[in-house]
Amino acid sequence: MSDNNDKRIKEALESIEPAEGAKERMLANIKRKAAEQSETAREINSPEKMNMEENIKNVTVNASKESSENTVKVARINRIVRWAAPLAACLVLVLAGSLVIPRLLNNSGKTIGGNNVQIANPIVEVENADAIKNQLGLDIDAPKGAENVTYSVIMGQTGEVRFDLDGHNYTFRGSKETDIIIGLYGSEEKAEKLDTKKNAELTVLRSGEESYKMINWEDGKTKFVIANTDGASEDQIKAVFSKLN
Amino acid sequence: MQEIAVRNATNFEEFYERNWKFVYRLCFTYMGNQADAEDCTEDVFVKVFNKKIEFEDETHERKWLSVTAGNLCKDRLRSAARKEVCSIDDENTPEIAAPEAEDHSDVLQAVLELPAKYKDVIWLYYYEDHPTEEIAKILDRPSSTVRNQLRDARNLLKEKLEEMIRR
């Protein structure tokens, strides 16, 4: 084969160009796949260590025609594990519920006609902050000026308040009994200490073009986190934190 | 001997930055289309991400990636070929052929149409500029096998290129 053809082959291989955005897209997928594989490996290796209440799979129970109003959708709870920065480029925070879980419709523990499936609802909507306080002994509420406020209790341990404020949606969770899980993952872009007394820290995560922000802190033995995924600025989420404290 | 640990967040991103394109090109050489090439590229880096891989230097790093990517792509193609044949016990299991490629230059097209078994040799010889002895070490094959494969691959390419000229 001639030198000229050899050169053409080399040039042909070098002419292979990835599609636009492939670099960033692949990196995001790599982190996601690595997180999923690592999570699966942990589940396979030590199932006895897992808290099974934290791993409820997607179940849609279709009730019989006679009791169609009892259809319950149990949302998947993503158990996300926080990885220390040296271990991975993908920062995942350990908590107890996904930020984007759809709301549950009914009370827990019903036997659904036709399928006879007993399901524990991980997220239960409640009426107001008093309801959370009565169940969990936890003081948690939306800040002044918030709109479209909803209240929930997650896994019987975490109180959640969702609200809109100044054009952004926030998820605010608190718990006296457990670490709080919010299903966000991405590269840690920034970590900033805000308040040493309450051990408050702002974390900014980057996932592709999206940026997620959260502030977690402690008040005695109670842990709190406020999170935003729709582009609130650092100043805005800090302002929310100030209002809540 | 400098060890390049690839475990912490910053190192992985740097590792990815310096290697992603060549791994993609190698995977594309095997798979022949962007979607599969991206998929295979991702899986190569996931292997690094989840395992404690330590490289002696960047040359070692590159060789490891070349071999790993090649093996991963061949497995993927083999798996796709088996699905078409139905029985993996079939004695007539076809050789792994290149998938149908997108529109490319004639030369690239000819390379993409080569059987998968020749691609690692072609890649290491033409893209990585390794001599055959070095390729034999990298692929853990006898030098004579590497020389024969390279000769057969180049003959196939020559035929394809001449055929393209005739058209």
Image (cartoon, coloured by chain):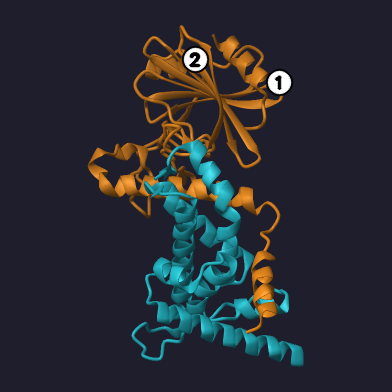
Chain colours: A orange, B cyan
Q: Quadrant of residue B158?
A: bottom right
| Label 2 element class | strand
Residue type highlighted by circle 1: Asp
Q: Is residue B128 above or below residue B7?
A: below
- Give coordinates of residue B160: x percent, y percent: 65, 87
**Marks 2 and 1: CB-CB under 8 Å?**
no
Tags 2 and 1 both on a single chain? yes
The quarter holding residue A86 reads top left
The residue identified by callout 2 is A200
Q: Earlier in the sequence, mark 2 or mark 1?
A: 1
Q: Relative to residue A4, is residue A35 drawn left or right? A: left
Q: Residue at x 52, y 35 (%)?
A: A184
**Secondary structure at numbered mark 1:** loop
Residue corresponding to mark 1: A166
- Residue B54 lies, in percent from the top left, at 39, 47
Residue A62 visible to the viewer: no
Looking at the rendered structure, the kind of residue marked 2 is Ala
**Which chain does the numbered disc 2 sit on?**
A
CA–CA distance in space, label 2 to label 1: 22 Å
Residue at the image position 51 percent from the left and 18 percent from the top: A201
Residue beneath the point at 45% across and 65% down: B72
Q: Nearer the viewer, residue B62 or B137?
A: B137
**What chain is tagged by disc 1?**
A
Q: Quadrant of the N terminus of chain B?
A: top left
Q: Is residue A44 left or right of residue B25?
A: left
Q: Residues within 10 Å of mark 2 (few under 14, many from 20)?
A: some
